[in-house]
Amino acid sequence: MLIDISGYTGHWPFRNLRGNTIAGLLARMNRFGVDKTIVSNLNGIFYVDSQIGNEELHNELQSDAIFKDRFIPFATMNPVLPWWQDSLKICHEEYGMKGIRIYPIYHDYKLTDSRCIAMIAAARDRGMPVSIALRMTDLRERSWLDVDKALSYNDIAEVISQVPDAQFMVLDARITDDQEATTADALAVLQQADVLFDTSRGSGVPVKGPNSESLRYLVSSFGAERIAFGTETPFVDYCSPFFRLGVFEELNETEKELVWSGNARRMLKI
Amino acid sequence: MKLNRRNFLGTGGLALLGASLSGVSCSEPSGASAGNAAGTFQPEGWKKLLQEANKYPKLDAHNHIWEGSNADQINESCELLGITRAACSIPGGKTPEAIRANNDAIIKGMKAYPQRIMGQCYIDPRFKKEALEEIDRCVDQGMVMLGELYDSVRISDPLYYPIVERCIKHRIPMMLHGVTTLGNWRPGYLPTNPPNSSLPDDFVEIGNRYPEAMIICGHIGGGGNWEYMCRVLQHAPSVFLDTSGSVSDEGMIDMAVQYLGVDRLLFATDMNYETGVGKIMWANLTESDRKKVFFENFNNLLRKAGNHVN
């Protein structure tokens, strides 16, 4: 089985995307042999009311029977909105969404904001993992209207330390050349947490290119049981993520199965 | 024997797959958005696509021997992605002596892996006499081009004229770090590259001054506005663009093909091996065009001085 923990539908305001519909994603998944994709609606990042983005995603998923069982919807949540608890309840209980994605830089709050901590705790109580992308696109190509910051592993560790029994997914997991170094304390927190790092930026070859992560680093730092396959589709080409893991030769077959889907299945209880 | 990707290829597995691969294309047809266009589920379809990628010989026009990227690692990384040869440089050096030492390290890599590593000679045009001497020395040592010339001087600066003329004389290409980060092209925003970094506009200027030169703008995916690169470089018909960089955005290569034409694109990685190959496989290219980008276009440039790969 193959599960992609890093997929999206919807629009990105700063450049056009392709394949950014549920139907478009399904076509890719079928060609590459991806059984399931965790998906959220990009529109929810930019609407003042993120819940409308979740409604769009739910309606899109209900629009064709062929989408059933192929997508794992995650709700786009903004804890600054006073109605986030209503949104979380609807997304979980009515829409069957399995987790949440949060965007603190785009929604202009700190990860350690008390409202964010409360929302992560609420997600934990519902058994919903919290997915956080360190960045959405390469900051060097940003529009003048886009954000100019990214999150780091240190930021993730800080929020995990406040809700240590929640489950997390870290997307676009990589350290850029100019990013602050991961502290020993942060590393210790991450190593103890129930967290999955995606492979979307991880080099599988011996050379770690600039602005990439090294799969070897992820595995040696956190173990194969904390790594999960991710594509970042539809932002980047759909071939590279498979090539990264496909050429990585430092995992045995059992460990590779964990990365392709086993770790995600465990966290999602599927 | 444990069957892994490398020995699978080596034992003829690729040939066995050949029939099933014919007609396989990585890219999706445009407009594949309707539910009924989803196609059938292909278990482990990605494996066929990796095999498909490996059937193309590839010449990497932009790579480096650098910290964390020594000749052994380059050789192994190239092997894993089916890259036939890689042109490598060590950009930098504050003095002619330091630059010469870096080029010597490249020569050492070339000798260690003569079937894998091609040499790119780095120079700084501010040291005119030493730079011209170094070009001659590096060509004598078997280097095939200049690269990756960096950000001490813009390529449109007259300091580059004698450098370009020397490359024309030797019939070798020259590749230079191209940037399109926001602050470097739009006043009012903090430049994230040094001010003397070369914009596509600089490549247009030098390309139009020396249309007979083989000038390569480095890395469309080097982290900048690649739309800017495509729209401006279309006005420099003699300038080539390499496809390297960590950025492998949807549609990037297709836009480059649209504005520059497939014959001006050169496959490259800049140490990003998987995205280097993946972005070309995902682009809407015919098999013939993919062969051009992966191999033939760069090989045709190398052919001018007899440095091509047979």
Image: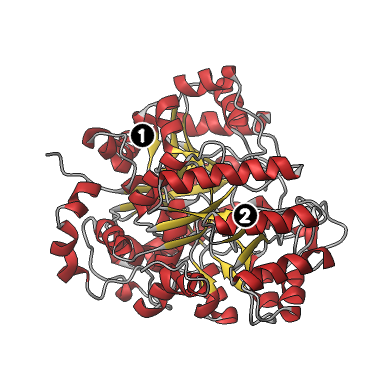
Dot 2: element: helix
Q: Mark 2 points at which residue?
A: B137
* Above-or-below relation of B51 to A103: below
- Chain where mark 2 sits: B
Q: What colour scheme does the image use? A: secondary structure
Based on the displayed image, in which of its 4 quarters is residue A104 positioned? Answer: top right
Residue found at x 39% / y 46%: B75
Whether residue A35 is visible to the viewer of this picture, yes or no, is yes
* Above-or-below relation of A238 to B69: below
Of the 4 image quadrants, the one containing the C terminus of chain A is: top left
Dot 1: element: helix
- The percent coordinates of residue A151 (x first, y second) are 63, 38
Q: Name the residue under label 1.
A: A267
Spatial separation of the CA atoms under disc 1 and disc 2: 59 Å
Q: What residue type is labelled 1?
A: Met
Which one is nearer the viewer's eye here, B54 or B155?
Answer: B155
* Above-or-below relation of A149 to B182: above
Residue found at x 58% / y 17%: A185
Q: Which amino acid does label 2 sit on?
A: Arg
Which one is nearer the viewer's eye here, A38 or B47?
Answer: B47
Which one is nearer the viewer's eye here, A23 or B252?
Answer: B252
Give left or right: position of B90 versus A214: right
* Res. B201 mark: none
Residue found at x 40% / y 73%: B290
Whether residue A171 is visible to the viewer of this picture, yes or no, is no
From the image, state whether disc 1 or disc 2 is nearer to you: 2
Which one is nearer the viewer's eye here, B244 or B34?
Answer: B244
- The percent coordinates of residue B299 (x first, y second) are 45, 71
Marks 1 and 2 belong to one chain: no
